[in-house]
Image: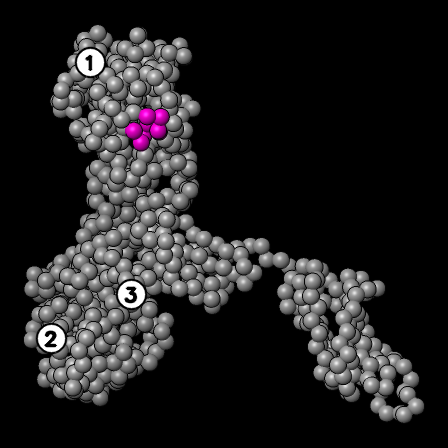
Amino acid sequence: MAGDGISAGKPDGSGGGKPVKISKLTSTVLSASAARIAWTTNVAADSTIEYGKTSLLGSSVTDSALVTKHSEELTGLEADTQYFYRVISRDSTGREVISAVQTFTTQSVDLTAPVISNISSTLSGTEATINWQTHEPADTQVEYGTTTDYGQFTALNLNLVSSHSQVISGLSPNTTYHYRVLSRDAAGNVSVSGDFTFTTSSNTGNAATIFLNFGGAFIPQWGSYSNLAMAAFTGAASVINNVLQAIIEKFSPFNLNITLTNPFAPSQTYSTPTEEANAKYAYYTQNRIQEVVVTGTNSSTYFGGNYGGIAYVNSFTSSIVNSVFVFASNLSNTDRYIWEASAHETGHAFGLQHQSQYDANGNRIAEYYGGVNGVAPIMGNSYNKRGQWWYGTSTSATTYQNDFAVITKSANGFGYRSDEAGDNADSAAAFGDIFGTSFGTQGVLTSTADRDYYEFTTTQDGLVSFSSSVAAYGAMLDSALEIRDANGNLISQAATSSLGETISNYFLPAGQYFLVVRSQAVRIGDVGQFWINGTVPEGTTSTAGPLAPSDAQPSGGASDEGGGVAPSELAGSAGLTPAVQRTYFAIFFPDEPRTGKKIKSASVTAVAKTLQVSQVSDRPISEQIYQPSSVSPAVIMAVIATLAAEKAAADPAARAELFQLAAGPVDPQGWAEDFAGFGHSAEFVEKAAAEENTENKHTEGIYSRLGLPGVLSVMAAKLVEK
């Protein structure tokens, strides 16, 4: 607050002179515990502030220095509290002036950490750009590593901002990295995100590369043009970043690296600019590098016209230097215009002609087709629409160009990127680590036929939510989401007019499911990057396929390089369908937490010894039996069966259910129902377990005769009987 109130002071001294006057009285709240009071006097005087939480005041600070500009800081104040104050100044003769009482209120204590949202990662070769937002200004840092122990940090950016971006460089190719983001607000409150992952390209150093050059270039010879000196781009740094993200999106279906870093980094020095430029472009040709020069030079300087960009068709594979040009000044230095032009000119270098429009008589009415319904071909005019690769007429009314086929032609030396997730349940990918109940993952749909399956298994009934988002800059994809059950049946889907989709708070019973990301496939160019965020019930797991029960095959051994799993997961990995698995464990393990519970059991040890297994301890069962060098699937059955028997021995109702299953279980997924009788089945199990090659006999005999539910039931029933 501010005021200029003056109260009467002492009478003037015998020497006369000016009375002391106060003006420009202000208070500035500095924090929850501090404020600054400032004022001026017309003559030099000292400074006193009386203050308190009532108008009675009660506390004071004094500075005896005689000044005309006064400023004193009050500290140790209480947060979110109104304070009363007045100021007093005395000159050298003792004359004083006292202000009217004023008030100020201290700040509230900020105990709320920044809310982190919209976390995404964008890859370019061995670099990853991590972006996120906070609801309030905060600093910026990323923690990352090849495991959830992380171990490395990016440089801390202390600038308090709401939109955050950091680049992680020097990453290893074909490597999955874990990362989380950290932001601290001005009050010191810190937020740390959940765990996210990205995987670097497996082709770094070998794949073709697009180098976005914003730094200027000298080209001694470009086709019929000589000594082209292209100035550096002078626009905002944010434009460069946005163009990078958009070009990564435009070429995301292809086996390409996109970079802002010049791949040509010679150790030697050159005597002339021409010598260095010739060496650089020879290197580009040898290493399949396409340069896109985004320049501040106007196109008319060398090419006699005002163009957004210029390129030679097929220059990537011809003797012409591997460079195309985009003239930013002709594009208003606007990011979306620059990225559409950059993709367009690069398309020419890879062999693409324009996508053109013709009338019914075959006359060309538009060399640059403008598209329809907000979507246009990149090789047409897509400056103000969602630019996509296209299938349509090009050099004539009867000549159709499939942009994808041209870009991936053998002469270019690269094709489509590898699929990070399979197209069906057999080859489903995992979400990666689930942080509590939240997770995030990302991928690329390389064609409209591409389906990315992600497996997840819930151990309890509950609500799931999934959302997909597309590239923030230059998006091509119109995504759709599906939830499918363990048999591939569609349960729920989201396929609206939005590019991103959401399935919110959908109830799922405990079991195995697949989240499917697909394109809405309105046009051939509906492809590109996607990011998935979701929440799932506590205890949910996600495992890479093949996991579909209808296709599960018995194997000679079980392994889980990721560590221990819960007993319920053991059954699923051994071949139980989710329906049978849920029924089985509901009967025998109603209180089982399914998180690697430690079990000390003489009967478990006895079963293991019967099957000639030496490595048995009181470690979690999941850790014991998932050691492929020492334990066979027969032990998995034996352990689960023993646990079932122990439960049944103490519970008559469970025992009745057990013997009912042993007598002939009804399996909805098609397991063998035709038992030869309890006694014969038990003898068969014992005989198979006693064979020297237990794993093969188990595979060839027990599965084919009884099915896993039958084997488990027989073994458990026999143990109870004993």
- Determine crowd level at label 2: few under 14, some 14-19, many 20+ residues with C-alpha closer than 10 A: some
Q: Quadrant of residue 348?
A: bottom left
Picture coordinates of residue 450, whole percent (x, y): 21, 49
Residue 263 in sight from this viewpoint: yes
- Looking at the image, residue 257 sits to the left or right of residue 491; the answer is left
Residue 496 in sight from this viewpoint: no
Earlier in the chain: of badge 1 and badge 2, it is 2
Quarter in which the N terminus is drawn: bottom right
Q: Looking at the image, which residue is at 37% across and 22% down?
A: 600
Q: Regarding mark 3 in the picture, which secondary structure is present there?
A: helix
Residue type at mark 1: give it: Glu
**Figure check: 237 above or below 715:** below
- Looking at the image, residue 26 sits to the left or right of residue 722; the answer is right
Q: Which mark is residue 246?
A: 3
Mark in the foreground, 2 or 3: 2
- CB atoms at circles 2 and 3 under 8 Å apart? no
Q: Which mark is residue 282?
A: 2
Residue type at mark 3: give it: Ala
Task: Report the span colored magenta.
Answer: 617-624
- Determine crowd level at label 1: few under 14, some 14-19, many 20+ residues with C-alpha closer than 10 A: some
Picture coordinates of residue 58, whole percent (x, y): 82, 64
The answer to if 37 sits in the magenta stretch is no
Q: Regarding mark 2 in the picture, which secondary structure is present there?
A: helix
Earlier in the chain: of badge 2 and badge 3, it is 3
Mark in the foreground, 1 or 2: 1
Residue type at mark 2: give it: Ala
* Residue at numbered disc 1: 686
Q: Determine the CA span between mark 2 and mark 3.
A: 28 Å
**Figure check: 631 above or below 316:** above
